[in-house]
Image (cartoon, helix red, strand yellow):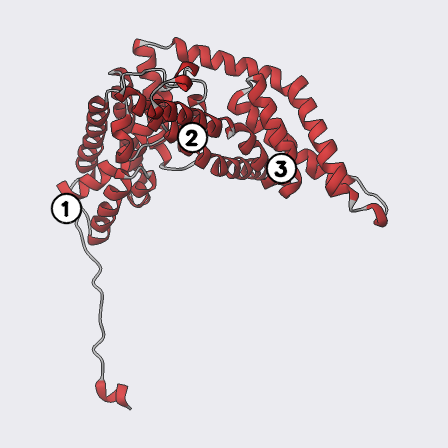
């Protein structure tokens, strides 16, 4: 029973996240372009309103771009709340979810508040649809009036007066805690996030860490995102590198998977490492956790700052202190490759041969 409920909630939350991520990426990348462009002119605060009046057209454009990126990020909470609701009760919950998501943004209830808003909107609309019964002649009023109006009203009242306050306090406490981290504590935080990201390679633990890190970008907290983006690519790069450095320890199939894993790593896709985790989970998963944790801790500890949710190579050079960032990725990658080769031992590799039957031409022609 509890397992079924948990699976349902996970499905709804992941649906909301899948619709939210493109917005986060679009907004953050546009802001990154703007800020990198501003840095060319020696401007560190391109978002400041004074740049809207600059005599330089390009600076004014960069200032506007920063605003457009922020606008996309600002839609993050309404969109995730709306599409969690959509996953639960179809389009009925989109309006309540959007409004509740805007409310969550305004009261500072953060990412957890947005998740709660989506769930409340979805289940409220589902209950209204199930239990509000009108005569057949008036039944069409339910989806076009009753559900949107009362669904939105109930959801925003619950968010504003019941759920929002504790989540806002929790969010503020989390922000203060993260902002207050320094030195060893910040490095430890980065290692934990890196380890979570490297644990299940795109699974629930990975997504929880990455999504939380992305959500914190909106409040100007960048260290968790830096740690997460470094950790995303280390497992596929490390395991792909292992197949090159120790070819004789892998069969043909895994050597081919290693090539794909390297490509997927460079473009920022953790899932490239999955074939290796499936083949030998008890050896691969601890290694990817360790390598990702080390790479993330190094990047954050040595001062790199990634302000965009981009892990692929195309985003590396927009990172503050990018040489350190790339070095951290390289260290994590070599740790994963080295430990993998060590733990793999000297297996006897037997490739399955593909048997090709000779064609009996006489039979074929007959």
Q: Position of residue 83 (x, y in %)?
A: 56, 37
Q: Is residue 142 left or right of residue 266?
A: right
Q: Is residue 59 left or right of residue 324?
A: right
Could you say which is closer to the camera, residue 206 or residue 305? Answer: 305
Could you say which is closer to the camera, residue 148 or residue 135? Answer: 148
For label 3, the residue is: 94
Could you say which is closer to the camera, residue 8 or residue 301? Answer: 301
Disc 1 crowd, CA 10 A, few/some/many (<14, 14-19, 20+): some
Please tell me the numbered disc located at residue 247.
Answer: 1
Q: Residue at x 61, y 19 (%)?
A: 164
Mark 2 and mark 3: Cα distance apart in space: 22 Å
Return the disc, 1 or 2, that comes first in the chain's sequence.
2
Q: Residue at x 17, y 35 (%)?
A: 342
Image quadrant where residue 343 sits: top left
Disc 2 crowd, CA 10 A, few/some/many (<14, 14-19, 20+): many
State whether residue 176 is above or below residue 71: above
Please tell me the numbered disc located at residue 27.
Answer: 2
Q: Residue at x 22, y 84 (%)?
A: 360
Q: Position of residue 28 (x, y in %)?
A: 40, 28
Q: Tell me the element at label 1.
A: helix
């Amino acid at each position: 029973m509890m397992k079924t409920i948990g699976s349902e909630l996970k499905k709804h939350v992941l649906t909301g996240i899948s619709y939210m991520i493109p917005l986060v990426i679009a907004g953050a990348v546009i802001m990154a372009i703007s800020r990198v462009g501003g840095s060319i002119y020696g401007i560190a605060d391109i978002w400041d309103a004074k740049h809207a009046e600059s005599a330089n057209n390009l600076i004014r454009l960069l200032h506007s771009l920063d605003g457009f990126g922020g606008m996309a990020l600002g839609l993050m909470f309404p969109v995730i709340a709306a599409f969690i609701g959509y996953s639960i009760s179809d389009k009925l919950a989109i309006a309540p979810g959007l409004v509740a998501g805007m409310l969550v943004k305004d009261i500072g209830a953060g990412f957890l508040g947005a998740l709660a808003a989506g769930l409340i909107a979805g289940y409220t609309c589902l209950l209204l649809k199930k239990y509000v019964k009108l005569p057949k002649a008036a039944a069409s009023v339910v989806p076009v009036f009753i559900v949107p109006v009362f669904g939105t009203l109930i959801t925003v009242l619950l968010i504003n007066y019941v759920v929002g306050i504790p989540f806002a306090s929790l969010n503020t406490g989390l922000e203060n805690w993260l902002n207050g981290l320094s030195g060893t504590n910040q490095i430890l935080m980065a290692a934990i996030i890196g380890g979570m990201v490297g644990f299940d390679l795109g699974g629930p633990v990975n997504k929880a860490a990455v999504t939380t890190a992305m959500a914190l970008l909106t409040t100007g907290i960048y260290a968790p995102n830096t740690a997460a983006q470094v950790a995303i690519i280390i497992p596929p790069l490390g395991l792909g590198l292992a197949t090159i450095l120790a070819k004789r320890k892998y069969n043909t199939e895994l050597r081919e998977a290693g090539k794909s894993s390297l490509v997927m790593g460079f473009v920022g896709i953790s899932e490239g490492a999955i074939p290796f985790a499936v083949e030998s989970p008890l050896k691969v998963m601890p290694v990817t956790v360790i390598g990702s944790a080390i790479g993330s801790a190094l990047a954050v500890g040595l001062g790199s700052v990634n302000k965009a949710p981009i892990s692929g190579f195309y985003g590396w050079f927009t990172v503050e202190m990018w040489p350190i960032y790339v070095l951290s990725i390289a260290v994590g990658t070599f740790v994963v490759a080295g430990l993998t080769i060590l733990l793999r031992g000297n297996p006897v590799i037997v490739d399955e041969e593909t048997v090709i039957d000779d064609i009996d031409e006489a039979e074929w022609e007959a």
